[in-house]
Structures are given as C-alpha cells and as structure tokens.
Amino acid sequence: LFVESRIAQGARVQLSDAQQHYLLSVMRVRDREPVLLFDGISGEWLATVDHTGRRTCASTPLEQTRPQDGPTLAVSLHFALLKPKRLALLVEKATELGVHALQPLVTARTVVREVSLDKLRATAVEAAEQCGRLSVPLVLPPLTGVEACLHSARGAVGSHVFACDERPECTIRLDDALAAAAASGPLRAAAFVVGPEGGFAPDEFALLRGGAQLVSLGPNVLRSETAALSALSIMHMRM
Ligand code: SAM
C-alpha cells in the first residue's frame, strides 16, 4: 500500500479510509497480519495491521523488504485529454508500464477539456500498488498547446522527445529511433507526445516537426490510448 507520509521503523502509519476498506472488507485482513507499505522514498516495508482502535492502522513498520529503486529510464508521457474511461485506462496501464510522469494536454482538436487530477492520481496510486512498483508517477497539471507541451517535455528530459504521429511522412519507427538514440550514449530519459482522437492539427504538426523527433508506431491508425501504451511498452523493454 502506498502511504503519503514518510515511513520510519516503529512509527505507526495511518491508512486512508479507502485503504482500510480494502484491507478489512476486500482482503479480510485481520489484526496483526502483515502488510507491505511503500512511500515512494524509502523503499518497501513489512508492517503489521492494527485495527483494534477506532481507525485501522498499519502499525510498526518492522523491516525494509526492498530498497527504493530509482528509474533507470525516466519516461514522461504528454497526452491529449481523453474521455474519462479511456483516460483511466491510460493512467492505469501507463503506471504499470513504469511511466515516471504523466501530463495531460489540451490541443486544437481535444474534445475533453476538463480533468480531475485527484482522480488521475488515485488511479495511479492504485495501479502502482497493484503492480508492485515502489513509486507513484507524478501527475502534472494540464498544459494548453503543443508549444507549452514541447517546452515541458524538453525540460523534463533534455533532447529525447518523441512525437507520435500516424501521417505517412512519419517514416521512422519508434524502435529504430530509440536504437539510434541509444547508440550515441545511454538513454536515461525520454518523453512521448500523443495527440487526441482527431489527431494533431497541421500547425501543431509543424511545431512537433521542429521541436521533437517524429515517430511512427506502425501502419495502423491507433486510438490515442493505444498509441501511448504502445510507445510505453516499447520503452518498458529498455527499463
Ligand atoms: N488524425 C487521425 C484521424 O482522425 O484519422 C487519427 C489520430 S489518432 C486516433 C490519435 C493519436 O494517436 C495521434 O495524434 C498520434 O499521436 C497517435 N497515433 C495513432 N496512430 C499512430 C501511429 N501509427 N504512429 C504514431 N502515432 C500514432
């Protein structure tokens, strides 16, 4: 379970209402049974559940079971906003695939323009707990426009910004682009930019051409979330 507060050996950790419900009602965990905790900073800890009081606590982290792992390859995903169900799927699967930061984007053809960052964060926490990673991806506030997106993507990772686009002129495949990038030195960070269902508008495409490396994810036109997850799964094999 992910806890917001820093874990220290012997210090009681208060669990959220949702975590208490999960432990007691879903997992049927009993008093003094073991539970694993992580805080994104100090690794994974074995703790015991204490629900004798008014609120359930995972008390007394006993010992560290895994040290904190830093990302070998920090990947950020900058994606045009999607409808809530597709967005939740994207955040869940991107977290499983080890994404380091997620940033929603409003572009010319983005239909959905509102997002609850709290919901996205909650989805990312659940997915991180489920898949066993020891960190929760950063969910960054949304940006408007491709220029702002490129600035953010470059700031986060230096020069390896890959803009995914289905146009025929995007002839370089992502896996080839990654191999070429890795040939000139170890790849430590990369950012991916993925457009909305209606694709990037021509002026946005021109900006992407100038500020990122355009890449193809194969011959088919993929839905936005499929495109993002396809890019991340190719990347995941390099982590
Ligand atoms: N412009 C298109 C249209 O409306 O027919 C489709 C856009 S596609 C559904 C959504 C996004 O997924 C694109 O903006 C692009 O970022 C990404 N994408 C989809 N297929 C891709 C492919 N084969 N290669 C690279 N990116 C792709």
Image: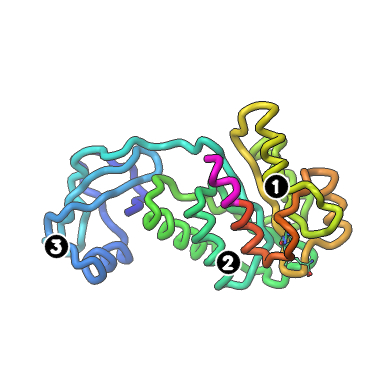
Q: Earlier in the sequence, mark 2 or mark 3?
A: 3
- Is 93 on the left or on the right of 184, as rendered? left
Q: Nearer the viewer, mark 1 or mark 2?
A: 1
- Magenta stretch, residue numbers: 232-239
- Is 169 on the left or on the right of 63, as rendered? right
Q: Is mark 1 within 8 Å of ligand 1?
A: yes
Q: Which residue is mark 2?
A: 87
Dot 2 crowding, Cα within 10 Å, few <14, some 14–19, many 20+: many
Q: Nearer the viewer, residue 214 or 171?
A: 171
Q: Which residue is mark 1?
A: 174
Q: Main secondary structure of the magenta part?
A: helix
Residue 132 falls within the magenta-colored stretch:
no
Q: Which residue is mark 3?
A: 30
- Mark 3 and mark 1 in contact (Cβ < 8 Å)? no
Residue located at (66% from left, 59% from top): 227
Q: Earlier in the sequence, mark 1 or mark 3?
A: 3
Q: Nearer the viewer, residue 163 or 124?
A: 163
Residue located at (35% from left, 52% from top): 2
Rendered position, 137 above or below 83? above
Q: Quadrant of ligand 1?
A: bottom right
